[in-house]
Image (cartoon, grey):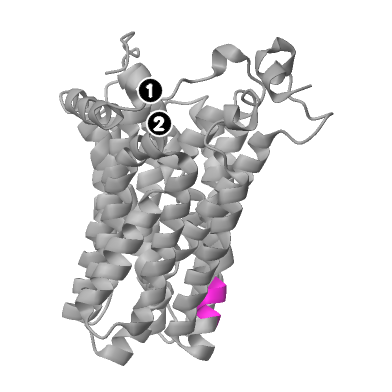
Amino acid sequence: MSPVSDLRDPASADPPARRRIHPAWWAAGATFLALLGAAGFRSTPGVMVEPLHSEFGWSIGAISFALSVNLALFGLTAPFAAALMERVGVRRVVSGALVLVAVGSGLTVFMTSIWQLVLLWGVVVGLGTGSMAMALVATVVGRWFVARRGLVSGVLTAATATGQLIFLPLIAAIVQSDGWRPAALTISGAALVVVPVVLLMLRDRPSDAGVLPYGGTAEDVVAPVRSGVAAMAVRALGSAVRVPTFWLLVGGFFVCGATTAGLVQSHFVPAAHDHGMPATAAASLLAVVGIFDLVGTICSGWLTDRYDPRVLLAVYYGLRAVSLALLPPLFGSDLNASMFAFVIFYGLDWVATVPPTLALCRDAFGQSAPMVFGWIFASHQLGAAFAALAAGLVRDALGSYDAAWFGGAVLCVVAAGLSMAIRRSPAPATAPV
């Protein structure tokens, strides 16, 4: 059967697994590898803070500013990445983003001033990783899959945790044995290795491979949108800001980002180093978070289908507040059962907030929910940027991270209150903005 007849034959709606591997799975595999590389770099800066501080004498706060720029651009790029994919194609955007990550990471070995760290680590890599975030997952799943959408979305989202699990111990070991420069070059090389895979395996649309979406029919083919997508994203924001639920969700997700990517992911390793724990051991602990992140997210999705998502969010943030308040005494030069318990629990709670937040977003915004959630996700990364910088400044001023952990606990209490303040209502039956 020719590719053209595949497109026109309704029988091709059945996944052709008996004949061959559907190209959708190759597209998903290439996307997973791209997300893996992006997540790997975003999760490793924490193990480089102390080496950069020791070699250049830069303050923890100054290094944290570069981290915060990276995190902020990662979030702010996401709402517009889908528009760029519509205009120039997914394959070009993803391969270009990987090159940006490789260049930004590789050129750091030549830097001598803090502004170069901000430019390379913050701006260049932030733009690159931001182009391979939620927008990429939504675009690939929406175009290539009708059947198994939930499964593929979960697997691609899990690439962030998997990247953390793979790269953190590896990069920490390289930093400890050979220094931070070989570690930066390792990240650069890993990003470049994925580029040919993306160019070979990731087509822009199923029609480019002569097939229908996996499990779909001709009616499921989405026509390209060549203009107006960025404006649509801005209009979605303009409508959402008039709804109180939007601001309550933004506030909660700001705290979520602040207490995960901004505080724990960026500063757990240097904080443990302050207490005499080897960086490799601390990085391995943080990698364990990635394992339990998968379990927690799946369980949270199951719970969201059965219980009030507002209550779930309040419980998640409340338990996170307790764990952060109890963290400072757990640090020490050796691993202990209490620290393992913290890591396991925090992993379960890491992105458990996403399913109930999505559910509340769908309730409030209906068909516009995906775009609105893109902006809510941007607030998550702004929170991460705020906490990454604030924790570094606290460490410089007080010589300890203790106040940062307690401040995160207070923010979580506030987020729990914001979650319970949300008023649920039926989703509006309006067309997307």
Query: Residue 138, which numbered label?
Result: none
Q: Position of residue 121 (x, y in %)?
A: 32, 68
Task: Choose between 115 and 288: the one closer to the eye.
Answer: 115
Left or right: residue 9 versus residue 304 is right
The residue beneath circle 2 is 358
Q: Is residue 326 visible?
A: no
Q: Secondary structure at mark 2?
A: helix
335 over 79 or under it: above or below: below
271 over 386 or under it: above or below: below
52 over 16 or under it: above or below: below
306 over 134 or under it: above or below: above
Q: Tell me the magenta residue range.
A: 169-173
Query: Residue 362, which numbered label?
Result: 1
Task: Choose between 204 and 216: the one closer to the eye.
Answer: 204
Q: Residue at x 61, y 49 (%)?
A: 200
Task: Choose between 325 and 212: the one closer to the eye.
Answer: 212
Left or right: residue 417 versus residue 155 is left
Q: Residue at x 63, y 15 (%)?
A: 217
Q: Is residue 172 magenta?
A: yes
Q: Position of residue 156 (x, y in %)?
A: 55, 44
User: As shown in the figure, which amino acid type bears the numbered disc 1?
Assistant: Arg
Q: Position of residue 264 (x, y in %)?
A: 38, 63
User: As shown in the figure, which amino acid type bears the numbered disc 2?
Assistant: Leu
Q: Residue at x 67, y 22 (%)?
A: 215
